[in-house]
Amino acid sequence: MKKLIFIFCLFGAAIPSLSQDNSFLLYSFKGNVTVVENKIESAAKVGRILTSNATLKLPTGAVATLICNESAMFTITKKGSFALNQFGDSCMVKGGSVSSNYVKYVWAQMTKSSGSPGSNRKAFMNNVGAVTRSVNNIWIDPRLDTMNYVSGDFPLSWKSYAEAEDFEFFLYKSNDGSPAFYKTSVDKLKIPISKIAGQMSQGNTYYWTAAVKGEENEEIKTLNYVTKETYETLLKEIKAAVGAYESEAEQAYRIAFMLEDLHYLSQAYDHYVKAAKLAPTNPLYRSTLMSFKKDYEIK
């Protein structure tokens, strides 16, 4: 069997599933793959849930990737008919990593019967900022507690409890109470990072906040200006993290999810856009992009 599949290796402890009563989700495929279930053969469809009694039929050159029990991903790469009850040893329970979180997230999104797909991404991510309520008139979403920025026109945004039209943005070199080294006035509830990028140097960490003009805000957020070399190394690792087959659109979506979890928001946005363009009929990709834009005040 090991010659027939490439296992998607996830971080964390692995415990084999002893039960053969596994459930499989068809995550991705290439070629004229068909499914035989209850003696009925039909064309494969991404997102379809299969029982261990089902059989996959792959012609020459075809590939099929499945998720088993919300946790493990593996790919069948050979021609033939494959009863899914043969793959019990591929159904491994894993947890604690971005990769395993993504597998669980995809399963949940493809099998959910209600709600907007992609809107609950944070429930499957490791790094969610602490919910805070500042004592002033400005509230900054915990999603922006820490951001790793490389390039792009991504906005830093906030909300105001006051009926104000003028705000001030502050940029600091430390969070020890030292005065801001850069300050600018804005008439919107956000500022594009590209506007302040010239004030920063790649490879350094900065801190920022916003306040109603004339007021102060002690809620400080972290902004890491990451070098392109550091980001490219990370991106290469993320791309290589999956040993299972996935289409270009599926890869772009996975990368976007993992980059968002790692706080590379501008680059995550680029990959969500890419996934939606590559697969315009996929409702999950389209809905996630819309949800992401709403979350981060992208127009």
Image (tube, helix red, strand yellow):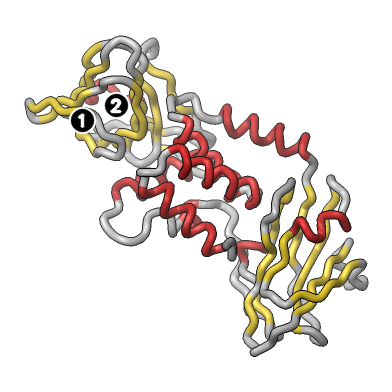
Please tell me how crowded label 2 is: few (under 14), some (14-19), or many (20+) other residues with Cα within 10 Å.
some
Instruction: Single out the residue that lies furthest toward the left.
Output: 39
Q: Secondary structure at mark 2?
A: helix
x and y, in percent, of residue 109 in the image: 36, 49
Above/below status of 274 relative to 244: below
Q: Are marks 2 and 1 in contact (CB under 8 Å)?
A: yes
Disc 2 versus disc 1: distance between alpha carbons? 9 Å
Q: Which mark is residue 52?
A: 1
x and y, in percent, of residue 234 in the image: 68, 36
In this picture, residue 157 sits left or right of residue 38: right
The kind of residue tagged 1 is Ser
Assign the N terminus to one quadrant of the image: top left
Q: Quadrant of residue 74?
A: top left
Q: Which mark is residue 88?
A: 2
Tell which of 166 and 175 is nearer to you: 166
For image coordinates 71% across by 85% down, the residue present is 136
Q: Nearer the viewer, mark 2 or mark 1?
A: 1
